[in-house]
Image (cartoon, rainbow, N blue to C red):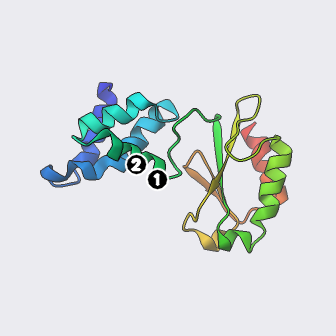
Amino acid sequence: MIEKLRKLIDKEIAKYPADKKQSAVIAALAIMQHHRGWLSQEDISDVAVYLDMPEIAVLEVATFYNMFDLKPVGKYKLSICTNISCMLRDADQIVDHLKKTLKIDFNEITKDGKFCLKESECMGACEGAPLLTVNNQKIYEHLDIKKLDQLLKDLK
């Protein structure tokens, strides 16, 4: 693990009692993923060693949360909420439009490597339904086809 990442993880560890540094596992995984764009087996192992955790425990966290990717994704990971609040506000139309426009299905990457489409559970922003995130960072709410097309155009 490179020193820059260790320092960032140390800042997260410092938020917890000394004997509870494993509580920083989600933050540590997010830091590692931000660096590479996804989590490799080496990243999982490095986090496990650094936090004194069994590797399987770190892997369980990485596979439980859909914000983590265990294989490369496109430059832009589009995660669309398909939970009930978003579906009641026409998220299914947004999903269909994304699949048709990008010519991919969930968990696929466009041929140019720019976009990956992910299905997401509730993002806790139901008042903004339907919504999606780009690279787990920027949230786009109250989507419709026109707003979606503009977003895709801006990202290209």
Q: How far apart are marks 1 and 2 (CA)?
A: 6 Å
Name the residue nearer the viewer: 110 or 155. 110
Q: In which quarter of the image is residue 124?
A: bottom right
* Identity of the residue drawn at 78% across and 53% down: 148
Check contact, mark 1 vs mark 2: CB within 8 A.
Answer: yes
Residue 135 as seen in the image, left or right of residue 145: left
Q: In which quarter of the image is residue 49?
A: top left
Q: Which residue is drawn at 28% across and 33% down?
A: 6
> On screen, 11 above or below 127?
above
Q: Pinpoint residue 90: horizontal percent, then vertical percent.
A: 78, 68
Within-10-Å neighbours for mark 1: few <14, some 14–19, many 20+ = few
Residue 142: image location, x then y, percent: 72, 66
When the figure is inspected, residue 120 is found, relative to residue 11, above or below; the finding is below
Q: Where is residue 107 in the image (x, y as percent from the top left)?
A: 67, 43
Q: Residues within 10 Å of mark 2 (few under 14, many from 20)?
A: few
Quarter of the image where one finds residue 11 = top left
Dot 1 falls on a residue whose secondary structure is: helix
**Residue drawn where x is 81% and y is 42% of the image:** 102
Q: In which quadrant of the rendered image does the N terminus lie? A: top left
Q: Which amino acid does label 1 sit on?
A: Phe
Pick the quarter of the image with the C terminus: top right
Q: Which mark is residue 133?
A: none
Residue sitting at x 84%, y 53% = 97
- Inspect the image, locate mark 2, and give the three-letter code of the amino acid beneath it: Glu
Q: Name the residue under label 1.
A: 64
Q: Where is residue 65 in the image (x, y as percent from the top left)?
A: 48, 53
* SS at circle 2: helix
Q: Is residue 63 above or below residue 142?
A: above
Question: Residue 60: which disc?
Answer: 2
- Given residues 93 and 15, the one toward you in this image is 93
Q: Given the current orientation, which residue lies at the most extreme top position?
A: 2
